[in-house]
Amino acid sequence: MNSTFSDNNQVEVVSSFPELINTKFKGTVNAICWNRNLNGDFKEIVSQLQLKENITDISVDDLLALELSEKGILAREIILNDLQLLTNFGASPSLNLLKSYERDEDFDFISTDVYSFHVDRSPIGTDTFLCTYYGAASDIIPNNQVTQKILVPEIREKLKQSYEGSEDGFENFLKENFFDLHYEAKSDAIPTNLGIGNLWRLAVDYPQQKVLPCVHRAPVEKGEVRLLLIC
């Protein structure tokens, strides 16, 4: 068990998929980790897949078409099993070969892309699942170690200057443009890296949610592609 996760009061560590989906978020816990040490050669899979654009969706047929070594076959079986587990659960997982996400360059004083600490929002009850098989992994951070960007005075003032509607509509403007989903880490904040091979379930912001949504961010790629399962 990874002590970084087990000592973190934001994270509940489990040892099976049934535990992952059935463990309830509670208190400060808004991230559940199926902690795994995966065998198999995921690099071999990545080396044979074709990156067609910055984010390429990899199908089951794409995986099955690969000519792999014994360790590559083991890695493929792990991915296929994860996809099947999540599909059986009722989720819609995607496997992405990823070079980079689109950057937000609309404003120089606030970023709203996935490299910024943010939460996911949904109109209905749902969770975010993700697993990095290869490449850099995402970070999460406790909610008490971040400040909502729209509450940072200088950012809020600049957003008001950019807003052209009535005063009553300003809060709706922030929400419609997803500014309210993004956070700034405090100076003493300690993010937790999600690691390779672990399957995570993160709390999402939705109307009946009983815990604070999990604040997370994508890693900045350093020339290396990622193989990521997400839903």
Image (spheres, helix red, strand yellow):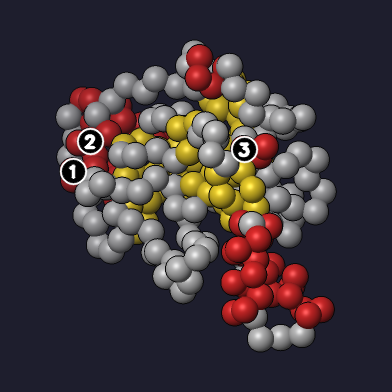
Closer to the observer: label 3 or label 2? Answer: 3
Residue 172 lies in what quarter of the image? bottom right
Dot in front, 1 or 3 = 3
Viewer-proximal residue among 121 and 96: 121
Q: Is residue 152 left or right of residue 102?
A: right
Residue toward you, 141 or 186: 186
Residue occupying the point 25% across, 62% down:
52
Earlier residue among tags 3 and 2: 2
Secondary structure category for the residue under label 3: helix
Q: Which mark is residue 203?
A: none
Residue 112 coordinates in the image, percent (x, y): 52, 62
Answer whether residue 199 is visible to the viewer in this image.
no
Q: CA distance from mark 1 to mark 2?
A: 6 Å
- Answer few, some or many: residues within 10 Å of disc 2's Cα (few below 14, many 20 plus, some between 14 and 19): some
On the image, numbered disc 1 is attached to which residue?
Answer: 47
Which class describes the residues within 10 Å of circle 3: few (<14), some (14-19), or many (20+)?
A: some
Going by the numbered disc 3, the residue's amino acid type is Gln
The amino acid at mark 1 is Ser
- The label shown at residue 43 is 2
Residue marked by disc 3: 145
Q: CA distance from mark 3 to mark 2?
A: 34 Å
Q: Mark 1 touching mark 2, by CB under 8 A? A: yes
On screen, residue 148 above or below 46: below
Cα distance in 3D space between marks 1 and 3: 38 Å
Of helix, strand and loop, which one carries label 1? helix
Residue 160: where, in percent of width, then height?
66, 75
Figure label count: 3
Q: Is residue 5 visible?
A: yes
Q: Secondary structure at mark 2?
A: helix
Left or right: 138 with respect to 149? left
Local crowd at mark 1 within 10 Å, few (<14), some, or many (≥20)? few
